[in-house]
Amino acid sequence: MNKTGMLILLLLASCCVDKSNFKIQKALVQTRQIQAKTTEKEVDTLKLDLDRSKLYWKGTKMRGAGSHEGEVIISQGFLLRDNAGLSGGKFEINMKSISITDIPKTDPIPIKNLTEHLMHADFFDVDNFPNSGFVITKITTHFPENPEISGNLTIRGITKNVTLSAIHHDNTLSSRFLIDRFDWNIAYEGSWADRTLVDREIEFRVKLVLRE
C-alpha cells in the first residue's frame, strides 16, 4: 500500500474508532528527516506551560505481559498559529529527567536500577545525548479537533520524520503513539534473552499545554 493510502486508512480509523476502546497507533516513520516549510503568513508564537506539559513513556516486555512507565520533562517549546489554526512548533526533552512512576517510592532500589538502566548507553545514552526533541514540519487539519501532525523526532542524535494523529482541545495538543525503538538505535545489547524479552515498541504520550 502506498503512503497516501496508508494515511487515508489511518484517518478513517481515527474517525470511526470507539474512544473507550482506543487502539494506539504506531507512528508512520519516514526514512529521513524533512525540512520544515517556511511561510510568509503572519504567525503567533504560543509558548508552552512547562509545568503542565509532559511526555509520558511506557515500555513492555514479553509482548505486553510486563511493563514499566514514567515521565520525562519537556524543557522548552512553543507552537505556531496562523489565521488557519496551528501551523508549526517544536519542543525539547530533557532526557536526564527520566523518572519511573509505576514502582512505589517505598522501593527506591528498583527505581534506581531501572532509571540507571534507561539512562545507560544501551538505551537512551543520556550522557552523550542529553536532549531529544520534536520539530513540526506539517499539520494537516481534516477536522480541527483531530489534526494529523508530521515532524522530525530526534532521539539519540537520530532524526526521522514521523506522522501522528493528535487531539486539539482548547489550549492543549496531545498525541499517543508507538515507535520501534530500533529505528532510533535504542537497542539493549545484553544477553539474547534480555534482548528478546524487551519489546521493540515504546509507547509515548505527549501533552502540550499552552500558557494562559
Image (spheres, grey):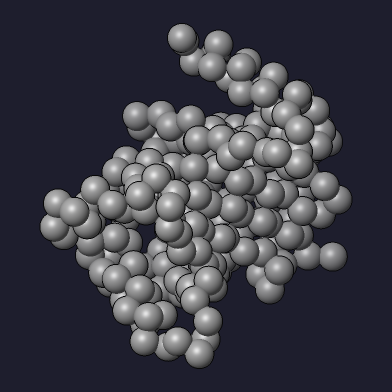
Q: Quadrant of residue 147?
A: top right
Q: Which quadrant: the C terminus?
A: bottom right
Residue 183: % across, % down = 32, 40
Q: Residue at x 76, y 38 (%)?
A: 19
State whether residue 83 appears in this view.
Answer: yes
Q: Quadrant of residue 43?
A: top right
State whether residue 157 appears in this view.
Answer: no
Q: Nearer the viewer, residue 174 or 60?
A: 60
Q: Residue furthest left?
A: 191
Residue 197: % across, % down = 28, 52
Q: Nearer the viewer, residue 212 or 19?
A: 19
Q: Residue furthest front?
A: 65
Q: Quadrant of residue 171?
A: bottom right
Q: Residue at x 50, y 49 (%)?
A: 203
Question: Horizontally, is 34 left or right of 41 in the view?
Answer: left
Q: Residue at x 55, y 13 (%)?
A: 4
Residue 134: % across, % down = 51, 49
Q: Residue at x 41, y 64 (%)?
A: 131
Q: Nearer the viewer, residue 104 or 202?
A: 104
The number of discs equals 0
